[in-house]
Image: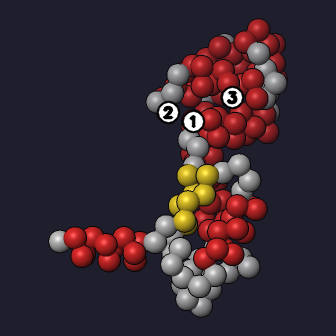
């Protein structure tokens, strides 16, 4: 079910997709705006990503996932199109900004089923079920 439930519990997969797309768009647009400089001097690709508080090795790993080794950069990157950079950004995001999926409302009816849907839709992701209401009650009683 892709819609919000009547009880105000939204669809976590929709939210996850939105966050990933926003991060991807942000980085892709930043790098693509300067990509002509990378075409002229392909080793600049590393500098395009290090502004996101990562090392050159992080970029190297993302390039490897795209099937590019260090020696291939000069010959392959100048011919890249948007789709190629999109692929690199997707790999970079998975390496540099892994997501922990915290699913709120674990104390409500259907929580286990919703969590399983998210696990099925996002295999390999860390999914943690939480309850803000339960935490609030605990903190309230500690005071």
Residue occupying image coordinates x 69% and y 16%: 42
Callout 2 environment at 10 Å: few (<14), some (14 to 19), or many (20+)? few
Question: What residue is pinned by disc 2?
Answer: 52
Query: What quarter of the picture does the N terminus occupy?
Result: bottom right
Is residue 103 visible to us here?
yes
Callout 1 environment at 10 Å: few (<14), some (14 to 19), or many (20+)? some
Instruction: Give the quarter of the image for residue 103.
Output: bottom right
Comes first in the chain, label 2 or label 3:
2
Question: What residue is pinned by disc 3?
Answer: 62
**Residue furthest bottom as drawn:** 6
Residue occupying image coordinates x 22% and y 70%: 142
- Pointer 1 and pointer 2: residues touching (CB < 8 Å)? yes
Comes first in the chain, label 1 or label 2:
2
Identify which residue, 1 or 116, lies in the foreground. Answer: 116
Work out whether 108 lies above or below 74. below
Callout 3 environment at 10 Å: few (<14), some (14 to 19), or many (20+)? many
Asked if residue 5 lies left or right of residue 86, the reply is left
Between the C-alphas of marks 1 and 2, the distance is 8 Å
Residue occupying image coordinates x 55% and y 60%: 128
Asked if residue 135 lies left or right of residue 139, the reply is right
Residue occupying image coordinates x 64% and y 40%: 94
Identify which residue, 76 or 129, lies in the foreground. Answer: 129
Where does the image place residue 108, in percent across and percent down from the top left? 54, 82
Between the C-alphas of marks 2 and 3, the distance is 14 Å
Query: What quarter of the picture does the C terminus occupy?
Result: bottom left
Question: What residue is pinned by disc 1?
Answer: 96
Between the C-alphas of marks 3 and 1, the distance is 9 Å
Where does the image place residue 25, in percent across and percent down from the top left? 62, 48
- Pointer 3 and pointer 1: residues touching (CB < 8 Å)? yes
Work out whether 14 lies above or below 75. below
Where does the image place residue 84, in percent across and percent down from the top left? 78, 34
Where does the image place residue 121, in percent across and percent down from the top left? 75, 61
């Amino acid at each position: 079910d892709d819609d919000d439930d009547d009880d105000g519990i939204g669809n976590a997969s929709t939210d996850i997709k939105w966050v990933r797309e926003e991060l991807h768009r942000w980085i892709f647009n930043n790098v693509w705006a300067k990509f002509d400089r990378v075409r002229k001097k392909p080793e600049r690709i590393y500098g395009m990503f290090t502004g996101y508080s990562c090392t050159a090795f992080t970029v190297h790993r993302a390039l490897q996932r795209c099937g590019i080794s260090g020696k291939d950069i000069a010959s392959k990157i100048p011919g890249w199109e948007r789709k190629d950079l999109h692929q690199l950004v997707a790999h970079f995001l998975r390496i540099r900004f892994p997501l922990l999926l915290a699913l709120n409302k674990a104390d409500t009816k259907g929580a286990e089923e919703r969590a399983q849907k998210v696990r099925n839709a996002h295999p390999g992701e860390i999914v943690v079920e939480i309850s803000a209401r339960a935490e609030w009650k605990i903190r309230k009683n500690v005071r």
